Amino acid sequence: MSSANGWGEGGADGAPPEQLALIREGVRQARAPKAKPRTWRGAKLAEELPVARVLVDKGVLHLDRYFDYAVPEELDAEAQPGVRVRVRFGAGRHRVREGRREGGGLIDGFLVERLAESDYSGPLAALAQVVSPEPVLGPELLGLARAVADRYAGSLADVLQLAVPPRNARAEQKPSPAPLPPPGIPATGSWTRYGRGAAFLESLAAGGAPRAVWNALPGPGWAEEIARAVGATLASGRGALVVVPDGRAVTRVDAALSAVLGEGQHAVLTAEAGPEKRYREWLAVRRGSVRAVVGTRAAMFAPVRDLGLVVIWDDGDDSHSELHAPQPHAREVLLLRAAHDKCAFLLGSWGCTVEAAQLVESGWALPLVAEREQVRASAPLVRTVGDGDLARDEAARAARLPTLAWQVVRDGLRHGPVLVQVPRRGYVPRMACAQCRAPARCRHCAGPLEARDAGALLCTWCGRDEAAWHCPECGGFRLRAQVVGARRTAEELGRAFPAVPVRTSGREQVLDTVPGAPALVVSTPGAEPVAEGGYAAALLLDGWTMLSRPDLRAGEDALRRWIGAAALVRGQGAGGTVVVVAEPTLRPVQALVRWDPVGHAVRELAERAELGFPPVSRMAAVSGTTEALAGFLAVVELPGDAEVLGPVPLPVTQAGGPRRVGAPPPGEQWERALVRVPPGSGAALAAALKAAQAARMARGGSEPVRIRIDPPDIG
């Protein structure tokens, strides 16, 4: 181009000098490093309370304490207890300038409190930055986090990572809505079906703190009943917190709360909501804009003001157990909140866990159940197909499905959808007596026996060999392990009814609801969709696959999953029928036929108390390499009444394959020891393990040792 075109002398691209200068300046500014938080060298300190006690975000046990920092005068107004701060961490005593410690890397933290002076004799580093003036860590949440960390032998920083969601500046800048006036006391509704249901709601509305274990009746009414309990609590001027296992349950309770309370009275806290929306909802709860919360396990730490009621639904679901350290269980966290805040507690489920039965047995909570006539009217008819029936059934031998199942499916499809529960793949069988099906257990510690090479039996708890096992129930000497192919069974059903649509719900795609039209719905346990008007029938196939899991909770979990599926079937009066393919003499099957999960849990609790099993005892799993585990067990100062079982080798995780939570790294051979203590020594056990782990980490132990308090899968 020429200067006649008005550009003048330009560069290679024909741009004028002024434009090139602007471009160069913009590039220079873009490449310039951003300013780091100041060290506040020589800055004047705050006149009042010049010391800030900070919890640094270091999730290591030997640093699980507070650190003192100086508060510069310019940060005095914003540096209030509960805010997020950044501090310099790791500078030694030799890096002191003008009476102020300097150096170290920047790290996030929470300002816990302001003090007039520090009990640390050396020079203090100054706060580097107040990230946000929003107080997110109140004293109630801090106390709860400390209690959870102590119970699970973890660090406070790790618990706060679970309790306080990451900051989102855009959500923080938006004001929360003004709180609505408390709603009126809701009607009792279907709570009248339970003997003490109306009295429970009346106590909540009057400001009381009742504690109950609720065995819910079959059907979809549980969500509305939870909503009415929350409404009664809000009517008394207090807050309520509801924790459910998954997003589908959140959706149902969310809709019920909106119908009972109206819009704007509650918040929903789930990870699926996204970081901005979740943080905005969490801030609304923290600021007191809403006093009712429903969510998944992350909501167990929700900072509800004036907490009056905590609710957990289906506490036996695996989703309630946190995957990240220190792996707390939502039920135990809510029990701590109920004790600390002196609020009401409601544990509800169609089934009943042993922990729930223990709460009633100890007198800490009262049972909230319906009369037997009401249960029989609401529950479907349950029929069983055992091994003897299968052996005599020609159709079962040919198609691997009993004749009774064919008939129930055919009759059910005339009136609506039929649910088929198929155990998911991956269940490993445990050994049992071939004659009476009693689980094979060790004579020394009552741990489950596992068949190894050449047929040798080995206890998976204490590692002892069992050469001369015999059944203590019937005296039999033969063992059995059975796994039935579930996928082929589902395919047989699809080929048998080609004119009927087949829908699947499982790991790849979980359905929430299905229409009330005739259809076959094949689902894995826990993924059963809700049918409009309820299912006409249900098949619970391959029961031995679920009962043969090598776990202490196999029977309890199988019954819980069976009842969870059967509760979606219409009542017996409406023709609802459930067929379970399992030996009818087994205790979980009998409990399903009678629809008596409470009785099953009470008997399980009595047996565990006799054998010293959790939850009557407290247990910890310690795992690591052979050398690391032996070194840890040699130095830990366990309580005098502690019993160490093992160690035993853990299965080697294959590279590229599925990996369970807490499993060893792929290809490494680890061992596990179980430490068991009687009631009353659980806190001492957690403290001893935490102290030993902290000392080991402070010495720079290279090989990891993992500790889990109250592991859900002890074998």
Image (cartoon, grey):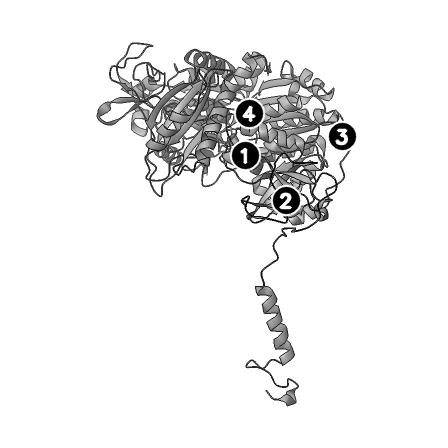
Name the element at disc 3: loop
Coordinates of residue 512 in the picture (x, y in percent): 54, 36
* Residue at mark 2 to residue at mark 4: CA–CA distance: 30 Å
Callouts 1 and 2 close, C-beta under 8 Å: no
* Residue at mark 1 to residue at mark 2: CA–CA distance: 17 Å
Mark 1: which amino acid?
Asp
In the rendered image, which quarter contains the C terminus? top left
Q: Nearer the viewer, residue 285 or 532?
A: 285
The mark closer to the camera, 3 or 2, is: 2
The residue that disc 3 covers is 182
Would residue 63 be visible to someone looking at this image? yes
Q: Nearer the viewer, residue 695 or 110?
A: 695
Query: Where 21 falls versus 179 (above or below)?
Result: below
Coordinates of residue 161 in the picture (x, y in percent): 56, 38
**Residue 64's disc number:** 1
* Residue at mark 3 to residue at mark 2: CA–CA distance: 35 Å
Coordinates of residue 49 in the picture (x, y in percent): 72, 38
Mark 3: which amino acid?
Pro
The mark closer to the camera, 3 or 1, is: 1
For label 3, the crowd category at 10 Å Cα-Cα, with few meaning under 14, some 14 to 19 and many 20 or more, is: some
Coordinates of residue 357 in the picture (x, y in percent): 53, 16
Tell me which numbered mark, 3 or 1, is placed earlier along the sequence.
Answer: 1
The residue that disc 4 covers is 332
Tell me which numbered mark, 1 or 2, is placed earlier along the sequence.
Answer: 1
Name the element at disc 4: helix
Tell me which numbered mark, 3 or 2, is placed earlier along the sequence.
Answer: 2
Mark 4: which amino acid?
Glu
* Residue at mark 3 to residue at mark 1: CA–CA distance: 40 Å
In the rendered image, which quarter contains the N terminus? bottom right
Q: Is residue 650 left or right of residue 185?
A: left
**Residue 85's disc number:** 2
Tell me which numbered mark, 3 or 4, is placed earlier along the sequence.
Answer: 3
